Amino acid sequence: MNDRQHDCSDQDHDAVYKQVDADFKIAVHNADILSHIIKGFVKELKDEDIEFIKKCVSPEDMSRIEGLNTQLINDGRDYVVLDNLFRVDIPGESSLGLILNIETQGDPTPGYPLFNRALFYSSGVIFNQKGTVFKGSDYGDMMKTYSIWFVLNSERSLANCVFDYTLVGERRIPSDGPGTPQHDMLEIIIVYLGGPESRTSDRAVEMMNDILLSKLGRKNRSEMISAKYNITLDDNTLGSLERIGMSLGEEIRTFQRREGAEEQARKDRIEHIENYTKSVLATMRRENTGVDETLDNICVPEDIREDVRAKVLSMTP
């Protein structure tokens, strides 16, 4: 592929993922979908019913949730715009507030650790609480921040995996002192969706597979989501979900083909190393030569030479 083709391909991918982001914003602002996401992934509300959770995100009982300002860290030169940001107010004797950032990630291999980006985003959300959630030095009023990421085009080995990152304290000195105070103020959750055909025992992951990655048409998708999760979707939300499926379809197939080719290449490399290792060992015994001399004599390819050498040395006295 020449540079021009590569640039065009990157632009095509970017356009697809931007469209997916735009449609996901429509879907996740649906009160039913948002409430089910919260129940499935926010531990403070996992035991509450959906109607109670809806009241936490929309006291006025609106079908669509407006959300918070998603522009962060504006220093006059640069800023970050999140996909979705919500405030969750849990009523009770000790009322609790949460800030919830929800993102999608279309490209499973973006060239950097996805956790680092999630940490950067959630740190920005915490920073921006000053002046909006609390004032001055009233840090005790700061709200816990969640950053939840749904990877829509997962590698097979990660399909339907959920990784949960929290702040954990550890007492270092003295080791036998009182317990470490814990401060549960940040939680990052990365969900690698596997698609509706994949199997998972987690109800929330299954729901997100069905909602975001179903291949069903609009009518059948609506009926399936209503029957399985008691979620009624308006035409706008259904249209956004349909577009997500259409946008991602070819991207997922392309990635799966590439992943399959990479797996085959990995297997071929292992087989070549095994075959050359056997050949080197047989030649060494037959001609009474050393390892490096034998590697030269039978022209072991440079890309596997060190692997073959290490394997031969591990099998010889």
Image: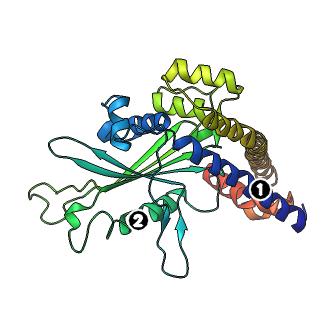
Quarter of the view holding residue 297: bottom right
Q: Nearer the viewer, residue 190 or 232?
A: 232
Q: Secondary structure at mark 2?
A: helix
**Residue 54 sits in which quadrant?**
top left
The residue positioned 55% from the left and 77% from the top of the image is: 78
Q: Which residue is disc 1 drawn over?
A: 288
Q: Residue at x 53, y 68 (%)?
A: 80
Disc sitting over residue 240 in the figure: none
Left or right position of 226 against 110: left
| Type of amino acid under label 2 | Ser
Residue at the far top: name it.
Answer: 227
Tell me the amino acid under the disc marked 1. Asn
Identify which residue, 278 or 165, lies in the foreground: 165
Secondary element type, mark 1: loop
Measured as percent of width and height from the top left, residue 143 is found at: 29, 57
The residue mark sitting in front, 1 or 2, is: 2
